[in-house]
């Protein structure tokens, strides 16, 4: 895999420094730094590439295996991220740094590749389709099960789409805050929301790096500073420098770390305080799991799984203890009803097993299901509340089906040319936010539109729905990547046409 990764990166013209001396299973530190200067259709930048190189050198000193990517087009950026994905293994510490143009649209942040079009008012979709969504990078690191994810954006320059005599894409510069981060993610922005970041303090400023990067890189190397301290010291120094030229720039950070993370050595006084709970840890050390005892009254509470079918909902309850009978009701609406029994003996009780499933109508509304059961001693336990949210349950159920049937996402057929069918994706579209495909490329680079979800009949495929697309007869393969409704991203799946398999 390493040789293939180097081949991909070399083809992209990346400056790469990778060192995988540790065993494949050991947690390691992996970094990708990206710097974009050479924009084709929006104003060029002067220091973004230098910033990426400086951060690359800094992270190497901190023990990271570093990939440095410069002046990335949309295609190159996607392939670079794919190579970064392949370098990350569960438990790793992943560090992503980006310097270049960034832009916020409707509360979402986009990193602009060098071939982003010069959009004007009303053309926000052009920017979205041609750019990299910052949230997707977070999702990809989560999918790779990185233990610690650090994302740094020196991308808060002015609106790159402003032009004299035209009305620019909405946005006054700066990026939107990323407040809804998952556990284990730490992000830093070179300027606060709606603020812009300084490339230099004045025309006489000969420092090759931006005001933020020159400061942040230096602070990262300070021994005994955790990530929060690095961010706070950087914020103070950058803010003070910006004040000298009467500019408002206050870097911000968003912290979802459970433990303190040190990239350059432990806290200086850690050895003097061995008894202080909890002990501070280095990034990339195996996590320490502290079991949490459940509350006594919920130790034997059942759990439920929901499945949607043409006739409505099937709800299956699971119990930790043997049961002699199960009853249920919708909270506040009716009396408890027995589920009955199935023709199977429970070997633990030597009695007939209660039916663990119930049915709900297709139009069942959100509410609370109350479940109770009779234990082995004949005592009634419960009732236990189980929340029923039809939309959330449908998404989870369809997501599970899509994950288990990923080999069926696409199928090919020859009929007056080559057709690729995506009926399977349409059938489970309620779990999907976006489908991206790539034709004869391993990087899905175009959006495949799905019909809207109908909660009344979510799996229905009706007349007029687009179910296939026509491809050139010479097409060899199609890659697919799904973004689910919960924001997570699937692995990229590749499907080969009959043309390929017959050769």
Image (cartoon, helix red, strand yellow):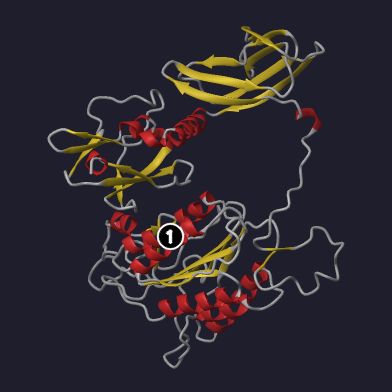
Mark 1 is surrounded, within 10 Å at the Cα level, by few (under 14), some (14 to 19) or many (20 or more) other residues, namely: some
Q: Classify residue 354 by image quadrant.
A: top right
Picture layout, residue 5 above or below residue 244: above
Task: Say left or right for 254 vs 270.
Answer: left
Label total for image: 1
Pick the front one: 214 or 13: 13
Viewer-side residue, 154 vs 260: 260
Asked if residue 331 is positioned above or below residue 36 in the image, the reply reads: above
Residue 294 position by quadrant: top right
Q: Is residue 203 visible?
A: yes
Depicted 230 relative to depicted 418: above or below: below
Left or right side of 53 for 184: right
Q: Position of residue 211 (x, y in %)?
A: 51, 81
* In the depicted structure, whether residue 346 falls above or below residue 202: above
Kind of element beneath mark 1? helix
Residue 45 horizontal/vertical position (percent): 36, 78
Point out the residue furthest to the bottom here.
Answer: 204
User: Can the viewer see residue 248 in this picture?
Assistant: no
Q: Position of residue 92 (x, y in %)?
A: 59, 58
What residue is drawn where x is 34% and y is 52%?
A: 442
Residue shown at the point (39%, 26%) measured from the top left: 458
Give the labeled residue for mark 1.
Answer: 83
Frontmost residue, 45 versus 84: 84
Q: Is residue 6 left or right of residue 39?
A: right
Judged from this view, the residue extending furthest toward the front is 503
What residue appears at the point 54 percent right and 64 percent down from the top-left corner? 30
């Amino acid at each position: 895999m390493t040789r293939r990764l180097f081949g991909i990166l070399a083809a992209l013209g990346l400056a790469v420094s990778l060192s995988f001396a540790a065993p494949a299973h050991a947690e390691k530190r992996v970094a990708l730094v990206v710097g974009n200067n050479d924009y084709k259709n929006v104003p060029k930048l002067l220091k973004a590439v230098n910033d990426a190189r400086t951060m690359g050198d800094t992270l190497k000193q901190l023990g990271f295996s570093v990939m440095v990517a410069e002046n990335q087009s949309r295609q190159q950026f996607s392939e670079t991220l794919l190579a970064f994905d392949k370098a990350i293994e569960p438990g790793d510490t992943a560090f992503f740094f980006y310097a270049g143009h960034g832009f916020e649209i409707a509360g979402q942040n986009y990193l602009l590749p060098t071939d982003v079009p010069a959009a004007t008012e009303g053309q926000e979709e052009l920017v979205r389709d041609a750019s990299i969504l910052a949230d997707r990078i977070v999702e990809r690191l989560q999918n790779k099960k990185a233990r610690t994810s650090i994302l740094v954006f020196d991308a808060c320059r002015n609106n790159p789409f402003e032009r004299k005599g035209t009305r620019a894409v909405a946005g006054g510069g700066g990026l939107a805050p990323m407040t809804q981060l998952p556990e284990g993610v730490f992000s830093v922005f070179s300027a606060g929301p709606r603020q812009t970041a300084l490339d230099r303090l004045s025309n006489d400023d000969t420092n090759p790096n931006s005001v933020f990067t020159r400061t942040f890189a230096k602070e990262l190397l300070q021994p005994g500073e955790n990530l929060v301290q690095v961010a706070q010291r950087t914020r103070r120094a950058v803010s003070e420098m910006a004040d000298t030229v009467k500019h408002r720039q206050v870097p911000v950070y968003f912290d979802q770390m459970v433990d303190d993370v040190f990239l350059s050595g432990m806290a200086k006084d850690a050895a003097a305080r061995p008894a202080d709970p909890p002990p501070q840890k280095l990034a990339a050390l195996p996590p320490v799991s502290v079991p949490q005892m459940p509350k006594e009254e919920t130790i034997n509470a059942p759990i439920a799984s929901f499945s949607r079918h043409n006739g409505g909902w099937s709800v299956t309850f699971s119990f930790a203890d043997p049961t002699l009978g199960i009853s249920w009701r919708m909270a506040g609406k009716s009396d408890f009803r027995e589920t009955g029994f199935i023709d199977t003996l429970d070997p633990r009780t030597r009695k007939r097993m209660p039916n663990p499933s119930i049915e709900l109508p297709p139009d069942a509304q959100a509410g609370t299901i109350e479940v109770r059961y009779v234990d082995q001693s004949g005592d009634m336990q419960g009732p236990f509340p189980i929340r029923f949210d039809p939309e959330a349950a449908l998404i989870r159920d369809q997501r599970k089906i899509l994950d288990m049937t990923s080999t069926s996402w696409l199928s090919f057929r020859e009929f007056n040319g080559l057709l690729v069918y995506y009926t399977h994706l349409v059938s489970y579209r309620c779990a999907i936010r976006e489908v991206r495909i790539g034709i004869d490329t391993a990087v899905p680079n175009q959006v495949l539109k799905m019909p809207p979800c109908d909660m009344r009949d979510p799996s229905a495929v009706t007349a007029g729905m687009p179910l296939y697309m026509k491809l050139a007869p010479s097409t060899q393969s199609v890659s697919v990547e799904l973004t689910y409704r919960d924001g997570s991203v699937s692995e990229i799946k590749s499907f080969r046409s009959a043309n390929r398999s017959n050769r």
